[in-house]
Amino acid sequence: MTKPNRILMTGAAGIIGQQIRDGLRELATHVRLSDLADPGPAGPGEEIVPCDLTDTPALPGLVRDCDAILHFGGVSTENTAELIHRVNIDGVYHLYEAARKEGVKRILFASSNHAIGFHTRETRLTASTPVRPDSNYGVSKAYGEALASLYWDKYGIETLIVRIGSCFPEPKDRRMMATWMSAGDMLRLIGCMLDAPRLGCPIVYGVSNNDECWWDNSETAYLGWKPQDSSARFAHLFENDPPEDPKDPAVIYQGGGFAKAGHFED
Ligand code: NAI
Ligand code: 15L
């Protein structure tokens, strides 16, 4: 793809959106930022288009004239099934429909490690590993991955499915030493997605080059993405933490606390 004229980022007010926003200006001439919440004023090359992803009639206008969509908007942790379905299942469906009708051909779908969170930490996962969701939230991400696959096979809309680990300014606990992804590595991955002459619908684990890692991206090496950061420089933050209990479900499973938690509505 030549440098896109206009890309849309949903979830622009969120943790990832705010971390990568400035870097997106290098990747496209115009960046359209959207969220329910206020992402702050538009800078050079930016336009702000507020939108609720559950407002189906508004979605074609939201995606119109965009060469690519970075879909980070939605419910980002466990919640009621009702809310998750409305935003992360119906909302994603209508966003893909809007993309199909408006001719947008390339999407990044922000999936999550919680789509595979009930795999144990000893299991090395690849792009071909079956989903094993650990929450209502994880199920919604598995749905989004399946929808992306359908829109590629049937309509030729390409999606980079990113099973993001933990994309925060720094890891918050010992588990995140393995799952952490820097904003810089996310931006480099988006660059690879926009540059790829033929993207298809690959699944990539969104994780930096950490010392401990449960995920193998070799099946998608054709994208040319090489994470450059590592959580190693944050190791001192957790060196005085008590030892992990090997019988704790939050330690056994990749999804950590999401796998351990009971039903959200109980
Ligand atoms: P976040 O919760 O900080 O940001 C999500 C944004 O979506 C928020 O600004 C929120 O206002 C917006 N949003 C929620 N409902 C909406 C609706 N109905 N209409 C429009 N906008 C709505 O989450 P974060 O951490 O920035 O994550 C971004 C995406 O990446 C999410 O889809 C999340 O599931 C996914 N992800 C994030 C990870 C991380 O480590 N930060 C890990 C795995 C996946
Ligand atoms: C996610 O999917 C969440 O969006 C984020 O808030 C973190 O909980 C992350 O996974 C994680 O597993 O660390």
Image (cartoon, rainbow, N blue to C red):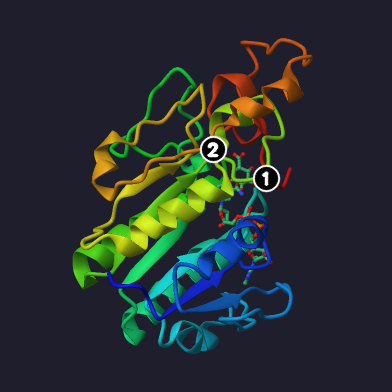
Q: Residue at x 45, y 26 (%)?
A: 214
The quarter of the picture where the C terminus appears is: top right
Q: Is residue 74 visible?
A: no
Which is more toward the observer, 260 or 199?
Answer: 199
Vertical arrangement, residue 199 with respect to residue 155, above or below? above
Q: Is residue 131 visible?
A: yes
Residue tagged by mark 1? 169
Q: Residue at x 38, y 53 (%)?
A: 161
Q: How many marks?
A: 2
Picture coordinates of residue 13, whole percent (x, y): 68, 67
Instruction: Give the number of the disc on residue 134.
Output: 2
Secondary structure of residue under mark 2? loop
Picture coordinates of residue 22, whole percent (x, y): 60, 65
Picture coordinates of residue 262, whole percent (x, y): 67, 35
The quarter of the picture where the N terminus appears is: bottom left
Vertical arrangement, residue 69 with respect to residue 230, above or below? below
Describe residue 266's horizontal placement relative to residue 94 as left or right.
right
Q: Residue at x 77, y 16 (%)?
A: 241
Q: Amino acid at mark 2?
A: Asp
